[in-house]
Image (spheres, grey):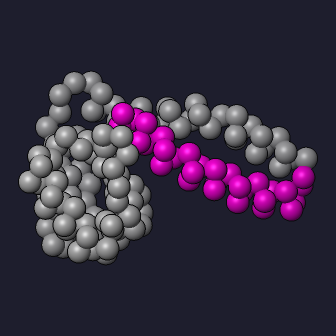
Amino acid sequence: MVLRAIRKILIPSYLLTMGVLGTVIAVCDPVVALFGVGGGVVSMPFVGKRFARHTMAPYLEGPVEETVIATSEEFRMEGPRTMGFRWVELASAKVIGDAWVLRFASQPMIFPARVLDDAQTESFTELLRQHGAWD
């Protein structure tokens, strides 16, 4: 399920990148653009899946301990991949399948929804509301 959430994030980003790149190339050489963008669209599912598996590899090998730290200033995850972002960088937050997806200015952050119990989920959504990322 978490891999599915990652693919839902990657595909629109990839299509936007390919569209912009295709437009720029089409202005220079329409024939090259046809083959380049066509090849990119055909390879997208394979590249996206490979990227998702590579990103999630430490989590797919077995149980992993992950610490989620949410303060009034920042959101941080510590585990196989430690990441942290300031709340001012947060663009949106939602649950896709069984994973939380937080979109920050520089990149998305995904973590399983089951890591938070009911009380923590309520506190977390309230924190997201305070920062304008949750309806």
Q: Is residue 70 visible?
A: yes
Residue 78: x, y in percent?
A: 18, 49
The quadrant the N terminus occupies is: top left
The structure residue drawn at horizontal position 30% and vertical position 40%, both measured from the top left corner, is: 98
The structure residue drawn at horizontal position 27% and vertical position 24%, both measured from the top left corner, is: 61
Is residue 16 found inside the magenta-colored segment of the image? Answer: yes
- Label tally: 0
Q: Is residue 54 visible?
A: no
Seen in the picture, residue 116 relative to 133 is either above or below; the reply is above
Determine the residue located farthest toward the left in the rendered image. Answer: 119
Position of residue 24 in the picture relative to residue 132 (left or right): right
Position of residue 3 in the picture relative to residue 34 (left or right): left
Q: Which residues are magenta?
A: 1-30
Residue 112: x, y in percent?
A: 26, 41
Residue 54: x, y in percent?
A: 41, 34
10 or 33, which lies in front? 10
The structure residue drawn at horizontal position 87% and vertical position 60%, both measured from the top left corner, is: 28
The structure residue drawn at horizontal position 40% and vertical position 35%, both measured from the top left corner, is: 3
Is residue 43 found inside the magenta-colored segment of the image? Answer: no
